[in-house]
Amino acid sequence: MSRVGRLLRTGYYTAGYGRRFPGHDRVERFVRDFEAREAKGDTPRERAAWDAQYARGEWDHLAGLGEQAYYAVIVGYGTFFAPGGSVLDVGCGEGVLHSRWLPHGYERYVGLDISEVAVRRLAQRVDERTEFRAADADTHTPDGKFDVIVFNESLYYLTDPLAALERYERALTPDGVVIVSMFLGSRRSRAILGAVRRERRVVDSTRTTQGATSWECLVLKTLQPA
């Protein structure tokens, strides 16, 4: 069954993701169930698993040199399109992106992460313009409007990334942008990236590479009515 599941998952992300085809719903359910059992590194996971990983320091490398190129691209895009604006950071983790954004200033910064462990570590950064919330991005509905909404290596951890993206877009200001950064070493991530490109208005993109690892960063303008 594991071999069949791997083959079906490969086919789904290679040719079927984001497209309707005969038996689509059945295949999608199978792939989701398979991923839940196999606990792949690029798939949704429970809060307890995230908390355990942050507690063990498994995400400490995000603050290191090897991750800085794509952080610079995200901040560069965000401060270009909305200098001093409001930011929603979906999947903020321990606040690496926030620390890079902070010197540029902002009107409001809200970070969301499913891990309560990660969010508790950000308590000292909270002020009248800055907040961090432990929330499941799969079900969370933002309050208020934001000039920039960032999915920094987080979109592929959502159960239905395309539906989530559409939901969050409703929280954009009329001239707001969504910034999506995606790791290119994952078949699931590449498939989601391709679907986002097909279904959204991409106004710019940048690929960064450090060592053997590459990321793609997209800037999206919403197709939803303001």
Image (tube, helix red, strand yellow):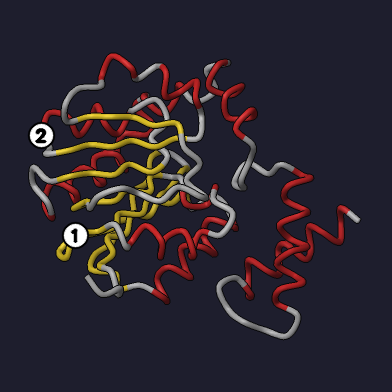
- The label shown at residue 173 is 1
Which amino acid does the dot numbered 1 rest on?
Answer: Thr
Q: Nearer the viewer, residue 214 or 113?
A: 113
Residues at marks 1 and 2, CA–CA distance in whole angstroms: 18 Å
Q: Is residue 80 left or right of residue 117?
A: left
* Direction front: furthest residue: 143
Question: Which residue shows up at 63% across the image and 40% down it?
Answer: 45
* Direction right: furthest residue: 1
Q: Secondary structure at mark 2?
A: loop
Q: Nearer the viewer, residue 78 or 167?
A: 167
| Badge 2 density bin: few <14, some 14–19, many ≥20, Cα 10 Å | few
Q: Is residue 208 left or right of residue 7?
A: left
Mark before the other along the chain sequence, 1 or 2? 2
Question: Which residue shows up at 19% across the image and 34% down it?
Answer: 101
Question: Which residue shows up at 30% across the image and 34% down it?
Answer: 97
Which numbered disc, 1 or 2, marks the residue closer to the eye? 1
In the image, residue 126 sits, relative to residue 142, either above or below, namely above
Question: Which residue corresponds to mark 2?
Answer: 105
Residue 57 in percent (x, y) is at 52, 17
| Badge 1 density bin: few <14, some 14–19, many ≥20, Cα 10 Å | some
Q: Is residue 210 left or right of residue 41?
A: left
Residue 140 in percent (x, y) is at 45, 47
Q: Is residue 102 left or right of residue 28?
A: left
**Quadrant assignment for the C terminus:** bottom left
Q: Secondary structure at mark 1?
A: strand
Residue 200 in percent (x, y) is at 35, 72
> Image quarter for residue 128?
top left
Residue 212 in percent (x, y) is at 47, 42
Which amino acid does the dot numbered 2 rest on?
Answer: Gly
In the image, residue 69 sits, relative to residue 214, either above or below, namely above
* Direction bottom: furthest residue: 22
